[in-house]
Amino acid sequence: MGLKVYLAGEIHTDWRGELATGCAGLDVEFSSPVTDHASSDDCGVAIMGAEDNKFWHDNKGAKLNAIRTRKAIGDADIVVVRFGEKYKQWNAAFDAGQAYALGKSVIVMHQAEHQHALKEVDAAALAVAETPEQVAQILHYVLDGSLPS
């Protein structure tokens, strides 16, 4: 029984790499958004043409990224949504809501100090973790029933 896991949210740290390392040997296929910030922001104008107004520049990019994200969330068995410590990730909250609406199993990951701000997101999740290691342990348990040693 393999899993397709979409890794949404914060792109400024290597949490995805840490999670992949923690899941070595598991039958897990990971997917994620484009994690190069400039490419993600500029995809719309790079493909469909420049915009003088920053709003329309961002709008084009957001819509192309939404196509990619909807496809990836739709294909996933589990969606892990990481809220970082430094930046506000409004798109991560949207991804969590979209995954929830599609009936996907959602794991939310954030630091304890964001607990109050994310209480509604946490309430919709099936698990709330603070570290990639905890998420890896959840995936181990889901796939083979093993607990951390």
Image (tube, rainbow, N blue to C red):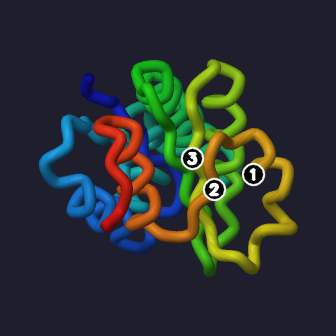
Q: Are discs 2 and 1 less than 8 Å apart at CB?
A: yes
Q: Residue 41 in the image: x percent, y percent?
A: 49, 53
The residue to which callout 2 is attached is 128
Type of the residue with mark 2: Val
Secondary structure, mark 1, is helix
In percent of width and height, residue 105 lies at 57, 32
- Name the residue: 44% across, 50% down: 138
Report which quarter residue 148 is drawn in. Answer: bottom left
For the residue pair 39 and 48, the one nearer the viewer reads as: 39
Q: Which residue is mark 1?
A: 122
Find out whether the residues at labels 3 and 2 contact each other: C-beta distance under 8 Å: yes
Residue 146 is left or right of residue 44, and the answer is: left
Q: Is residue 84 above or below residue 31?
A: below
Which residue in the structure is indicated by mark 3?
A: 107
Q: Residues within 10 Å of mark 3 (few under 14, many from 20)?
A: many
Decide which of tag 3 and tag 1 comes sooner along the chain.
Answer: 3
Q: Is residue 112 visible?
A: yes
